Image (cartoon, helix red, strand yellow):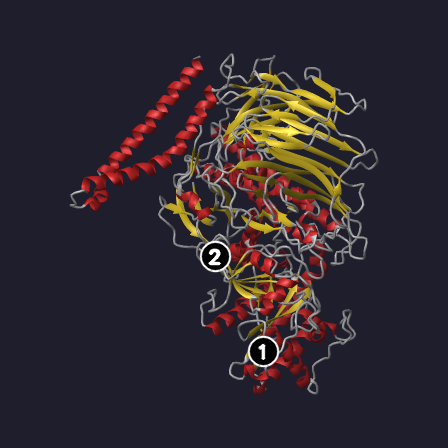
């Protein structure tokens, strides 16, 4: 009764406050002279003022409505449990057998300003080319186009250039993969260092020679290996405009599987290196080899202050269509951009490849004759059987006219009389001979063309930016501006096919183990960056900089570079040779170990109550990161928990313990309820785990105390049931943790939490249905596993290509699974174990977990352990079959940054309908949205109404003829992690009747938070026992005000010192992303106070105990700065925008 009284008083007080604040607001309206003017001197002025007041009141009521309804929900949760727990704060079972959790005394509210919901439903700038419309339009047929096989015959009138000569820019380049057939280091030793060494000599021989270079990972390794004279010579070539650095990222990143955190990070790493060593800022993007292009890349380049970009690997039907409409150059705009601030000028290469035969013009047989590396006697020749000829006086006229014909034909596909001719290929120019062959022969051709005015051509070597500047100049516009009549495009370029029906959709899943590892390392990198920056700033503030291990910065640099290297388009894609993949994995693992050390050292300093007691010993860490393990045999342990998310987090944490007699105390001595359960080493063997619910501060470190104590009423045991299919499996249990077993039956069985009721198949143990607590309607969500084979014909699936042998077949196991059902007050789980008893074992172990609180409690945690090492040419998929009426429309994310509508096209082959899913995909109808969040990039599709399907792993025995020379046979047992979120459209927010027309959409706030908790798990850091005892510790909460919940703190990155790249400067980069939010889905209690501010944030009021001494807006990669703002300024972000600021904190 006491609890109920408290609740009633609390509820009443809240209501009074709400009413009183409304009264004050009304009063303010009444006394606001500005608002009274429009009353004027009319006789009805009183009515007019009253009307105004009523409108004001309605608006204020609307804004307060949500807050009050959430307070009401919280109060209801407190009172309406149907039973009162004996002590007032213990979990207990209600009459219907479901667990009821104590409320942790913190009602939470969701206060989203209506203005912050407008962006998702607002109007967009119209674009001339929407890629979904282009897809609808095209037939995707493949008629023979003559010499340009995938195109058409190009004709021209010889007099077209009489008044305006053709400007030709030949751009020599060398595409250097930082790992593919050889490892990064082997490529450097064997080829790349020679290319760069020769470049210094050969470009200096003639000032008319030009070259472009892209990958800073290689360039920096070369720079650090040469003497100061070579460095100076290289710097001179760059500053003199002979060598241009294009894009300037650490690598030429993959655009399908990479997460935007890592895409930005590798771009910053490259640009910071350039700024420190060369003082140059890249102007143009160059992406000739990623297998399809994402709309995220133009946004990032634009925000890094680039003006132009180039792409190459685009579906041949789209290239042909854009060529025929002269739309190969366009302004690429973000689909969500209400105006044109995201526009960047983009050039799409028209032909099959970026090699020399496919870049001078439409006829590869002719273009190959102008690749002078292929002169007779060399190791490379022309497959078209006509070799190049060295240019001499007797043949120069004929050669020049033949080449000019190709240049003119190519230029007919573009809108200006300027043509770009790349001249290069993979690892070209590694021998001095090739530099001479190409540059000397081409210079003779240029000299001839330029000295014959009747040819109406001006030909020269150029850099990429030389070409773009010439285009802007002939169009009479400023650099980066839209030339008149050039089209505006929105959308992306997935999926890519280079010929026939060879779709590059396999690499969206290839080597999922490494795709998963990548995201774990990224989350640790972000966490380590933030904690390190905060620890160093706090150490400076306390005057203890000298005692803190600032040298940990070198570990951050190493990790940035390892993660950056893996974003390469043969790294995260899973398309490198096995030994190269192992090399990437080793580098990532080494970095992960380093990052754990950075996190431990920062956490140690930040949780010390009295910093005077702080001592750092390199050999004796204060904390450890043994995964989830708190079990060494000591009577008492302290545990520090790190929450890497920028919002408060109510969640459950599980640690391994060596006793079932465990108690958990908060920092202020409160005992927490603990759920004891079994830790299963196999389907029927176990030891003990302790799970407890915690509330963690945003980006903070909380301290807990675990100790061995006799049973308390706060320690509750899980109830475990093994559903056996009669094969005589028996369970071996730790004595105090009871295990029951029963014969499985085909009846659906249900598990209920506070928010969800889930139905499971009695036969398979797999999910069948979901019902939300507030929804009378049960939604069918049936999980199935299916497999694809590969074609029997010559072309088969490989690391890049997905070429299935038809529709998927059910994944059948000879024996039914053992299904384990664990229920308890804090979490429940259902695990199905499928095994085939052949060796090596192929296994599939879907695991469904649900906790009962916070954001975690509103979705289903799904982990599938996949092991297909005994399969041959098989791909395993997880399919969700629902009764959601999504038609042929589904949505996938691009790089975890934005959503892209997709359509399933019957006119395309099955494999063409797969898309990358780096972080989420959803289907929806007018009632529900079902979102599958993922912790690793995988390929996804929706092949039929109501379905969502993900490829989990692929094992392929052969190469797919794209240069790799291997299949995919190095599979590992891989845990694929997901969260499945069912949301209901709020009434009054029903999507228009035209629901199944694909249009721009955004995730809900809940969906964004679900993604955050899935990708940034709480890190458990046990304090190592000390002989002299543990000094007093306290929770570290870095924020003194809450961050608006549509903001994501992408990074807080310590900027390198200009003197020593391995130590930090006093500055940090704060990178913020304001998310686009769909408010049309019913909001639920997220377990934390969530407010939005129309994009406003006071940075000086954000960090506790730190002074802000500089606040300077920067370009995304920190190379361009705006004037500093006053330290107490409020910064403002528009929805979807990413902004970077340079801060000085102490």
Q: Secondary structure at mark 2?
A: loop
The residue located at (48%, 57%) in the rendering is 342
Which residue appears at 21% of the width and 40% of the height? Answer: 47
**In the picture, residue 862 is in which quadrant?**
top right
Q: Is residue 632 visible?
A: no
Q: Position of residue 337 (x, y in %)?
A: 47, 54
Using the rendered view, name the quadrant where residue 105 is placed.
Answer: top left
Identified at 53% across, 72% down, the residue is 415
Of pointers 1 and 2, the one earlier in the residue sequence: 2
Residue 751: where, in percent of width, then height? 62, 25
Visible in this render: residue 460?
Answer: yes
In the picture, measured across the screen, residue 419 lies left or right of residue 584, that is: left
Task: Please report contact status of discs 1 and 2: CB closer than 8 Å, yes or no.
Answer: no
Looking at the rendered structure, the secondary structure element under dot 1 is strand
User: Of the numbered discs in the image, which one, if any, rests on residue 342?
Assistant: 2
Say which quadrant the N terminus sits in: top left
Give the residue number, with chain letter if any, for mark 1. Answer: 459
């Amino acid at each position: 009764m006491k609890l109920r009284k408290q609740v009633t008083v609390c509820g009443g007080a809240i209501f009074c406050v709400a009413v009183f604040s409304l009264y004050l607001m009304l009063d303010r309206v009444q006394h606001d002279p500005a608002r009274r003017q429009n009353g004027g001197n009319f006789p009805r002025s009183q009515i007019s003022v009253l009307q105004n007041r009523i409108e004001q009141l309605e608006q204020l009521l609307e804004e307060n409505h949500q807050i009050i309804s959430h307070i009401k929900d919280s109060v209801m949760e407190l009172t309406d449990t149907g039973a009162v727990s004996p002590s007032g704060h213990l979990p207990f079972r209600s009459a219907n057998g479901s667990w009821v959790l104590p409320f942790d005394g913190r009602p939470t509210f969701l206060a989203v300003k209506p203005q912050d919901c407008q962006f998702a439903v607002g109007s967009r700038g119209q674009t001339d080319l929407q890629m979904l419309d282009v897809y609808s339009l095209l037939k995707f047929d493949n008629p023979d186009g003559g010499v340009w096989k995938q195109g058409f015959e190009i004709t021209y009138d010889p007099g077209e250039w009489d008044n305006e000569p053709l400007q030709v820019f030949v751009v020599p380049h060398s595409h250097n993969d930082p790992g593919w057939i050889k490892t990064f280091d082997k490529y450097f030793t064997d080829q790349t260092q020679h290319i760069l060494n020769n470049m210094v000599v050969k470009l200096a021989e003639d000032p008319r020679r030009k070259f472009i270079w892209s990958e800073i990972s290689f360039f920096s390794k070369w720079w650090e290996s040469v003497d100061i004279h070579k460095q100076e010579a290289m710097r001179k070539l760059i500053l003199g405009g002979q060598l241009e650095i294009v894009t300037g990222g650490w690598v030429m990143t993959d655009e399908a599987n990479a997460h935007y955190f890592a895409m930005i990070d590798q771009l910053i790493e490259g640009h910071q290196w350039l700024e420190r060593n060369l003082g140059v800022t890249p102007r143009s993007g160059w992406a000739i080899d990623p297998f399809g292009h994402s709309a995220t890349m133009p946004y990032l380049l634009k925000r890094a202050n680039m003006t132009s970009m180039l792409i190459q690997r685009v579906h041949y039907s789209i290239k042909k269509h854009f060529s025929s409409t002269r739309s190969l150059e366009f302004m690429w705009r973000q689909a969500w951009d209400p105006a044109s601030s995201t526009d960047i000028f983009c050039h799409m290469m028209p032909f099959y490849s970026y090699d020399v035969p496919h870049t001078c013009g439409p006829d590869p047989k002719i273009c190959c004759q102008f690749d002078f590396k292929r002169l007779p006697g060399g190791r490379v020749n022309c497959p078209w059987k006509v070799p190049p000829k060295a240019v001499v006086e007797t043949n120069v006229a004929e050669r020049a006219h033949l080449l000019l014909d190709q240049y003119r034909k190519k230029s007919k596909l573009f809108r200006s009389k300027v043509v770009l001719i790349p001249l290069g290929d993979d690892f070209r120019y590694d021998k001095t001979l090739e530099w001479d062959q190409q540059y000397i022969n081409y210079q003779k051709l240029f000299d001839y063309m330029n000295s014959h005015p009747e040819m109406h051509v001006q030909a020269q070597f150029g850099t990429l930016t030389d070409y773009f500047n010439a285009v802007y100049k002939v169009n009479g516009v400023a650099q980066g501006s839209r030339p008149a009549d050039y089209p505006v495009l929105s959308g992306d370029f997935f999926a890519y096919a280079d010929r026939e029906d060879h779709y590059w959709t396999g690499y969206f899943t290839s080597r999922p183990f490494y795709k998963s590892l990548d995201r774990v390392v990224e989350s640790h990198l972000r966490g380590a960056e933030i904690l390190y920056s905060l620890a160093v700033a706090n150490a400076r503030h306390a005057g203890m900089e000298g005692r803190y291990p600032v040298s940990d910065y070198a570990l951050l640099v190493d990790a940035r570079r390892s993660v950056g290297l893996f974003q390469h388009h043969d790294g995260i894609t899973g398309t490198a040779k096995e030994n190269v993949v192992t090399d990437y994995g080793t580098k990532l693992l080494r970095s992960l170990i380093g990052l754990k050390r950075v996190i431990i050292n920062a956490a140690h300093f930040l949780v010390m109550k009295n910093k005077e007691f702080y001592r750092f010993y390199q050999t004796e860490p204060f904390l450890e990161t043994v995964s989830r393990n708190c079990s060494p045999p000591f009577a008492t342990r302290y545990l520090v928990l790190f929450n890497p998310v920028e919002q408060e987090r109510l969640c459950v944490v599980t640690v391994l313990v060596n006793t079932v007699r465990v108690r958990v105390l908060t920092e202020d001595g409160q005992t927490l309820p603990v759920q004891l359960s079994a830790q299963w080493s196999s389907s029927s063997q176990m030891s003990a785990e302790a799970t407890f619910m915690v509330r963690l501060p945003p980006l903070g470190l909380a301290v807990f105390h675990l100790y061995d104590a006799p049973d308390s009423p706060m320690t509750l045991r899980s109830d475990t049931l093994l559903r056996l299919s009669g094969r005589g499996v028996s369970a071996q249990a730790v004595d105090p943790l009871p295990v029951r077993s029963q014969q499985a039956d085909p009846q659906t069985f249900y598990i209920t939490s506070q928010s969800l009721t889930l139905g499971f198949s009695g036969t398979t143990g797999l999910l069948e249905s979901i019902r939300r607590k507030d929804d009378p309607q049960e939604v069918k969500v049936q999980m199935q596993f299916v497999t694809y084979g590969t074609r029997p014909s010559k072309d088969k699936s490989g690391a890049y290509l997905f070429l299935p042998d038809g529709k998927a077949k059910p994944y059948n196991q000879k024996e039914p699974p053992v299904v384990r059902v664990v229920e308890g007050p804090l979490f429940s789980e259902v695990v199905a174990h499928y095994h085939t008893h052949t060796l090596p074992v192929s296994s599939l172990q879907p695991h469904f977990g649900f906790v009962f609180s916070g954001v975690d409690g509103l979705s289903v945690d799904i982990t599938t352990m996949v092991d297909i090492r005994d399969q041959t040419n098989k791909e395993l998929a997880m399919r969700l079959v629902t009764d959601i009426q999504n038609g042929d429309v589904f949505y996938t994310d691009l790089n975890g940054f934005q959503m892209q509508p997709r359509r399933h096209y019957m006119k395309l082959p099955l494999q063409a309908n797969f898309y990358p899913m780096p972080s989420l995909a959803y289907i929806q109808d007018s009632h529900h949205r079902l979102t599958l969040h993922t912790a690793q990039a995988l390929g996804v599709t929706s092949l039929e109404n109501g379905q969502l399907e993900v490829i989990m792993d692929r094992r392929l025995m052969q190469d797919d003829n794209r240069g790799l020379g291997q299949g995919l046979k190095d599979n590992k047992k891989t845990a694929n992690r997901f969260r499945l979120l069912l949301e209901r459209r709020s009434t009054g927010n029903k999507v228009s009747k035209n629901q199944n027309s694909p249009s721009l959409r955004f995730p809900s706030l809940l969906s964004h938070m679900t993604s955050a908790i899935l990708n940034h798990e709480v890190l458990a850091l046990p304090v190592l026992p000390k002989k002299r005892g543990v000094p007093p510790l306290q929770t570290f909460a870095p924020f003194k005000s809450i961050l608006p919940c549509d903001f994501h703190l992408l990074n807080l990155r310590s900027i390198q010192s200009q003197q020593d790249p391995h130590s930090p400067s006093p500055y940090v980069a704060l990178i913020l992303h304001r998310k686009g939010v769909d408010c049309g889905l019913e909001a639920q209690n997220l377990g934390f106070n969530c407010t939005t501010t129309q994009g406003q944030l006071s940075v000086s009021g954000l960090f506790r105990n730190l002074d802000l001494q500089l606040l300077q807006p920067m370009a995304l990669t920190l190379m361009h700065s705006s004037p500093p703002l006053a330290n107490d300024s409020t910064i403002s972000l528009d929805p979807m925008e990413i902004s970077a600021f340079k801060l000085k904190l102490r």
